[in-house]
Image (cartoon, grey):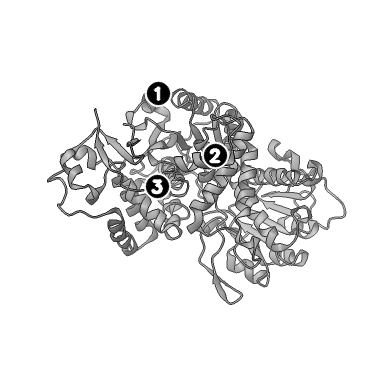
């Protein structure tokens, strides 16, 4: 059933509602709890189905927030919040927006990782779409569900590479649910236009296969041609049902992630957040850090630990950024060094196709123990690394010695351990500060407690995709863009750096405060939308002014509020 927001003669919003009674109050998008007015209770036959008392959204949300605080563990808080979302979406998003810095880690990383691991145990109520391999012939029927009418953005995963936790099978559904919650809480994407999807192709996680409570398809993962055909059947059905959809691929294993992005990026409006979103937030944070370091990007030597799809995605966007600022591509590539589990990617070791542009020719001038396995430590020392980025999911791989060596190369080494959850971080903030004598500029991929710097408490910058993908979605959906391009991600990264507190104070944080995420999202969304218009990819044409673009973004942005309900027709 499509959620219908309309305007009255005075331009005020209202919702046209055709259901009543229990059907109304059991629908999380329509349910207002105690917030139904007396007139609405009469019109929609709610008298006797609700307690008599009336409470405004503001008053009731304060009470519910206190209840959240009383929950004993982060997972318990996550479960309560998910239950609230399933009962009353407006209330859920009102509380998230009012307390976003505190609650964001609960609805997404790091707590969502534990929630995915225990998804079968904490599952309470259906949300989203479960497309299992044995039911592939019913995909069209599934998408025709009237509850999905009006959907504009889908986040889909197959659950194989959940954060740094590996194969979580159907439990991976927690990721699309969490991602889309951020789309709404941060970037104002209406929740009734979102759809989380899990492609259940089995699991190779033996603990799940042997778990009698596991809710997914208890079968080994389908791979190869069968897998490709299944995904293609899903994407084809999505294109048919939702021709203007924004489709985000999330937490697919490396071989499938790149393959699917390359296959579908020119067929519909789609992107892979692990590859492109991670790259954009990393580059945005780097641009913010170089403002504080006083050293231009063109002078830095960048080492990326983790040469999979995320690491190479970061490398490619750094290269594009260097070219954007005037460097020729071949020279830009010389500044970037990729290290995987077998060492530096050189012409002396086997490499994958997508790593090819960044292969380094081995030089005898380097001092190494084994030229066929140049370690991370040796790479940092020999290339004179000044920026170190981790997407390896190898906890502690950024040793004290490595960071200390970087501190010899530059006054302010830039160190970003981006793997999440926190148990997979390449180093902790305290370790980085200690090894660099407090001089490193740092950011992490997940939330960490505040640190003390220069005698005062300071938040740890969370170099998290939440700064990028919701805003990207807002810019794309508000302007009805037909495709997602690499340039959109570059301009999103640059736009983020323009709001860096370090731009005016080198001792300040690199990234804006999480409480400012709505402002940040609209700023980035404008940069993305402007790029779409200038590239001829917007449904609204290529002659929109900046003011017109900003108006479209504001008109699209959804705020969690109880709108008046007017009786509609069935």
**What residue is at 70 percent from the left and 57 percent from the top?**
387
Label 2 residue SS: helix
Q: Is residue 391 visible?
A: no
Q: Earlier in the sequence, mark 2 or mark 3?
A: 2
Q: Which residue is the site of mark 2? A: 549
- In the depicted view, which residue is nearer to us: 497 or 424? 497
Q: Is residue 479 visible?
A: yes
Q: Is residue 161 above or below residue 365?
A: above
Q: Nearer the viewer, mark 2 or mark 3?
A: 2
Q: Which residue is the site of mark 3? A: 559
Q: CA distance from mark 2 to mark 3?
A: 19 Å
Could you say which disc has been placed on residue 140 in the image? 1
Q: CA distance from mark 1 to mark 3?
A: 32 Å
How packed mark 3 is, by other alpha carbons closer than 10 Å (few <14, some 14-19, many 20 or more), is some
Q: Which quarter shows the N terminus?
A: top left
Q: Is residue 219 above or below residue 211?
A: above
Whether residue 540 sits left or right of residue 93 in the image: it is: right
Q: Quadrant of residue 402?
A: bottom right
């Amino acid at each position: 059933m499509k959620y219908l927001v309309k305007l009255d003669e005075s331009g005020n919003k209202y919702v046209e509602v055709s259901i009543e009674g229990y059907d109304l109050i059991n629908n999380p998008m329509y349910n207002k709890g105690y917030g139904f007015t007396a007139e609405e209770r009469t019109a929609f036959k709610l008298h006797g189905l609700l307690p008599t008392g009336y409470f405004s959204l503001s008053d009731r949300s304060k009470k519910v927030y206190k209840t959240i605080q009383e929950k004993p563990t982060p997972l318990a808080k996550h479960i309560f919040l998910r239950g609230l979302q399933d009962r009353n979406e407006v209330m859920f998003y009102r509380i998230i927006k009012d307390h976003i810095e505190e609650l964001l880690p609960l609805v997404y990383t790091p707590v969502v990782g534990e929630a995915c691991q225990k998804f079968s145990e904490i599952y309470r109520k259906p949300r989203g779409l479960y497309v299992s391999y044995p039911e592939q012939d019913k995909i069209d029927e599934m998408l025709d569900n009237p509850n999905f009418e009006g959907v504009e953005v889908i986040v889909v995963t197959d659950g194989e590479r959940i954060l740094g936790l590996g194969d979580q099978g159907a439990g991976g559904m927690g990721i699309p649910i969490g991602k889309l919650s951020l789309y709404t809480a941060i970037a104002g994407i209406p929740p009734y236009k979102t759809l989380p999807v899990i492609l259940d192709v089995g699991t190779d996680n033996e603990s799940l296969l042997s778990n009698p409570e596991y809710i997914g398809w208890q079968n080994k993962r389908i791979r190869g041609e069968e897998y490709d055909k299944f995904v293609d059947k899903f994407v084809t059905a999505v294109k048919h049902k939702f021709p203007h959809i924004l489709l985000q691929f999330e937490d697919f294993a490396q071989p499938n992630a790149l393959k699917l992005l390359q296959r579908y990026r020119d067929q519909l409006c789609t992107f892979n957040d692990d590859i492109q979103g991670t790259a954009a937030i990393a580059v945005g944070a780097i641009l913010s850090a170089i403002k504080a370091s006083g050293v231009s990007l063109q002078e830095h030597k960048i080492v990326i630990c983790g040469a999979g799809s995320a690491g190479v995605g970061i490398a490619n966007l750094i290269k594009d950024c260097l070219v954007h600022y005037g460097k020729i591509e071949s020279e830009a590539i010389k500044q970037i060094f990729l290290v995987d589990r077998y060492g530096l990617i050189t012409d002396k070791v086997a490499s994958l196709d997508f790593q090819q542009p960044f292969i380094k020719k081995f030089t005898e001038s380097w001092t190494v123990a084994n030229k066929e396995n140049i370690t991370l430590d040796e790479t940092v020392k020999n290339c004179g690394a000044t920026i170190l980025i981790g997407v390896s999911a190898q906890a502690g791989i950024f040793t004290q010695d490595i960071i200390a060596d970087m501190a010899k190369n530059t006054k302010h080494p830039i160190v970003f351990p981006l793997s999440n959850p926190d148990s997979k971080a390449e180093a902790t903030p305290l370790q980085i500060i200690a090894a660099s004598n407090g001089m490193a500029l740092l950011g992490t991929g997940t939330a960490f407690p505040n640190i003390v710097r220069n005698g005062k408490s300071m938040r740890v910058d969370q170099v998290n995709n939440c700064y990028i993908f919701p805003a990207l979605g807002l810019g794309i959906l508000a302007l009805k863009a037909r495709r997602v391009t690499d340039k959109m991600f570059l301009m999103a990264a640059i736009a983020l750096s323009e709001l860096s507190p370090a731009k005016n104070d080198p001792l300040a944080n690199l990234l804006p405060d999480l409480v400012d995420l709505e402002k940040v999202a609209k700023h980035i969304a404008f940069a993305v939308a402007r790029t779409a218009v200038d590239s001829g990819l917007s449904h609204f044409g290529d002659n929109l002014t900046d003011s017109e673009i900003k108006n479209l973004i504001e008109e699209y942005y959804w705020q969690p509020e109880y709108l008046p309900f007017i009786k509609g027709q069935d």
